[in-house]
Image (tube, helix red, strand yellow):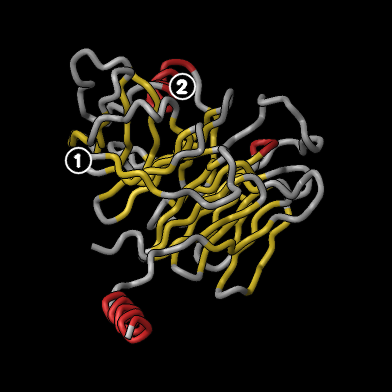
Amino acid sequence: MLSTVLFSIALFGMASGAGKPAAPSWEPVFQGEKGPDGWVSAVVAIGRDDFFVSGGWGITRSTSGRLQRRDTPGHGIFGLVDANPDGIFALGAGELILHFNGTAWVEEHAGAAVPPRTKSPDSLLYSAFQTCAEGSTIAFGPKRILERHDSSWRAVSGAERERFWDLVRGWPSLGATRPARCDAGSWFWLANGVAWSTCQDGRTFQVDCGKLTPKARKPTKCQTLSAAASAAGRIYASCANGTLWEVTSDAWRPLTPPKGAGKELGSISVADDCLFVAASRTVWRRCGVTSP
């Protein structure tokens, strides 16, 4: 009699859980090679099975598992930026700027090659954004800032340089006034003309070409932000302590980070319903995160 009851309970448990979808899990989808240049710096996904990865070797595109590699000897790639609809920009050492036009990578700018593992930031570029008013693209690093016009890049100077540095390092005004008593914290460019900024007191705001939208206050568990990306009205962010979050106007919802990723969640990208995270030498993917 007892065995019959236990069997019935087991069947009930199987039936009651049969209709529940499995929780999305992380899977490694790219692994950097061993050696000094095998580190991964950024990931940009344009589809569930189509994404770009950059690092010390250059850039690799993975399309349904098929890899296409573009080496950049002497110019490690430190950043990838999706400037839709203008394509993707890769930025690296020696002022290297590559532009993916949908078919191939085109070198648009480069300075002198940099010795491997150099610690000098003088000629390093790692990110870019597009302004609202001018519609121009700005590439920058710790000490460099360049502006793009008609596929050519030029260094800016004087008052113009200071104005762009205000966008790079301070509040991304873009026609929006900084909120009262907001001492600027960290911020990220999410898309062309769209930025996400934080205040030192934990308030966060999305700035979309002059339109200011408050987002939920940053939790105390996240002292320093590492990376951010947006999709479907949500922002996905990583913090320097290795935590991962989904941010809406109402709350920061913690997400389980990839096991073994450590605290180096340095790049995030979202495509279709999949979240991509790059850390150290690995890129992980977790699908089902952006579904309603």
- 1 or 2: mark nearer the eye: 1
Left or right, residue 128 beside residue 249: right
Image: 177 above or below 193: above
* Nearer to me, 129 or 206: 206
Q: Residue under circle 2?
A: 161
Which residue has dot 1 on it?
Answer: 249
> Does residue 124 appear left or right of residue 115 in this picture?
left
Q: Residue at x 34, y 81 (%)?
A: 2
Q: Position of residue 71 (x, y in %)?
A: 73, 56
What is the secondary structure assignment of the residue under circle 1?
Answer: loop
The quarter of the image holding the C terminus is: bottom left
Residue under the image location 37 percent in, 43 percent down: 245
SS at circle 2: helix
- Amino acid type at mark 2: Arg
Q: Can residue 178 be spotted in the picture?
A: yes
Residue 221: percent from left, percent from top: 39, 29
Among all residues in the image, which is located at the extreme front?
1
Q: CA distance from mark 1 to mark 2?
A: 34 Å
Which residue is more in the foreground, 234 or 1? Answer: 1
Assign the N terminus to one quadrant of the image: bottom left
Residue 243 falls in which quadrant of the image? Answer: top left
User: Is the Cβ of the residue at disc 1 closer than 8 Å to that at disc 2?
Assistant: no
Q: Earlier in the sequence, mark 1 or mark 2?
A: 2
